[in-house]
Amino acid sequence: MTSPHQALVSSDVALRARLGKARQMTDSLFPLLRPDALYNRPIPERHRLIFYLGHLEAFDWNLIAGQAFGIEPFHAEFDKLFAFGIDPVDGGLPTDQPADWPREKEIRAYNTRVRARLDQLLPETESALLHVAIEHRLMHAETLAYLFHQLPLDSKLLPRWEKANAAPEAPPRMVAMPAGTAVLGQPRGETAFGWDNEFEELCVTVPAFRADVFPVTNAQFLQFVREGGYDRQALWSAEDWAWKNKSALTHPCFWRWDGREWRLRTMFAEVPLPPDWPVFVSHAEASAYARWAGKRLPTETQWHRMAYGTPQGDERPYPWGDAVPDRQRGNFDFAHWNPTPVQAHPRGNSAFGVADLLGNGWEWTSTPFKPLPGFQAFRFYPGYSANFFDGKHYVMKGGSARTAACMLRRSFRNWFQPHYSYVYSKFRCVEE
Ligand SMILES: [Fe+2]
């Protein structure tokens, strides 16, 4: 077998082992569903769950066997059907029915055949493609979690009882961030992997500002709800207001009022609203809260500054320094199914004392998702980022409990449209 990318062929056994572990991770998710849930569509803007069962293998097949090796398809129909997810912006919801999708058995047979053939090709597969396959799969381990989250509780099988972490109370406060520089992205080179939108490096001067030490909690957001935040048009942009009204939204989508108290839908249970967990909301709701509080959402560069900057003027790879992520530093890498209190991981604090930056929920920024100067789309996946440079998506930083550790690197950027409520997305505010 000869590869068209022979010069870049990886002999890296470690990468193949990582792909194996990523497969185990996604394989471990589907058994959490009761069998009849597989054809549900828990989020109206997304495909039915059955799509994802085929998508993970079809993506790898198309990327590696199809594009890199030019191998003839053995199931072209599935390669196409399961190639891409969907992200409609305001309207145009999918209307397909369960019967429009193949049977689970056929998809599982396809998956088995894909893996067997790919395993023969992997030793000669270029490293960048292995990284893409690994991270794409791990990203879906997260998207599957928030899709499963929206299923009725009785559609899921509880893996184990998860005790809510307790942590001493920590009142909200702000910290002064002196003016300095923030380094976004990473230089184009041979060494580190990054998605196309992480290149190239960009150094930005950031004026002084003040930042919330902790993300906004359920208790804080409840004040906003009680003071009529969802009814005050002045707090919302025109588009956000129209969307909120159309969706009849009166509180965060993970919350439920039971007639007596507010409750939170966690992954496997409904619990009284934990006051010190971060609130998960859309960009629109986060922006309205910030306006109500007389503050703003941070820009992407402000977020970098508070997370990675130091009083000495240098930048560090992680908020806490150089050490690779471990579970003492934050709620990430599949450590939990649910959030922890915002003050639960002081060992993850940044040099400026800002807490809970990596993990426990992605953080919204006010920065529309745009290419960094020098951007080049991946030749093998041209639409990964470029399809979303439409001014209708905002950068998110940080990570959630279900974000793999490899994606906690400084240059990693996530993005979502402002009217998407289902992702594990928290926020904090700044003052200029
Ligand atoms: Fe995907």
Image: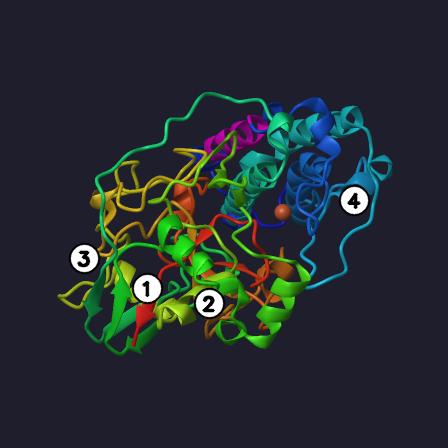
Label drawn at residue 351? 3
Q: Is residue 354 found left or right of 262 in the rendered image?
A: left
Question: Secondary structure beneath disc 3?
Answer: loop
* Frontmost residue, 371 versus 428: 428
- Judge whether 91 appears above or below 139 on screen: below
Disc 2 residue type?
Ser
The C terminus lies in quadrant? bottom left
Q: Quadrant of residue 66?
A: top right
- Judge whether 291 appears above or below 88 on screen: below
- Do residues under tags 1 and 3 come within 8 Å of each other at their CB atoms? no
Q: Quadrant of residue 88?
A: bottom right
Task: Kindly report which numbered mark, 2 or 1, lies closer to the viewer in this rendering.
Answer: 2
Question: Secondary structure beneath disc 4?
Answer: helix
Task: Kindly report which numbered mark, 2 or 3, lies closer to the viewer in this rendering.
Answer: 2
State the CA–CA distance, disc 4 to disc 2.
Answer: 37 Å
Residue at the disc numbered 4: 81
Magenta region, residue range = 17-28
- Do residues under tags 2 and 3 come within 8 Å of each other at their CB atoms? no
Task: Kindly report which numbered mark, 4 or 2, lies closer to the viewer in this rendering.
Answer: 2
**Label 1 vs 4, first from the N-terminus:** 4
Q: Main secondary structure of the magenta part?
A: helix
State the CA–CA distance, disc 2 to disc 1.
Answer: 19 Å
Label drawn at residue 304? 1
**Label 1 vs 3, first from the N-terminus:** 1
Tell me which residue sits at (52%, 52%) in the image: 252
- Do residues under tags 2 and 1 come within 8 Å of each other at their CB atoms? no
Indicate yes or no: mark 1 CB to ligand 1 under 8 Å: no
**Label 4 vs 3, first from the N-terminus:** 4
Q: Is residue 23 magenta?
A: yes
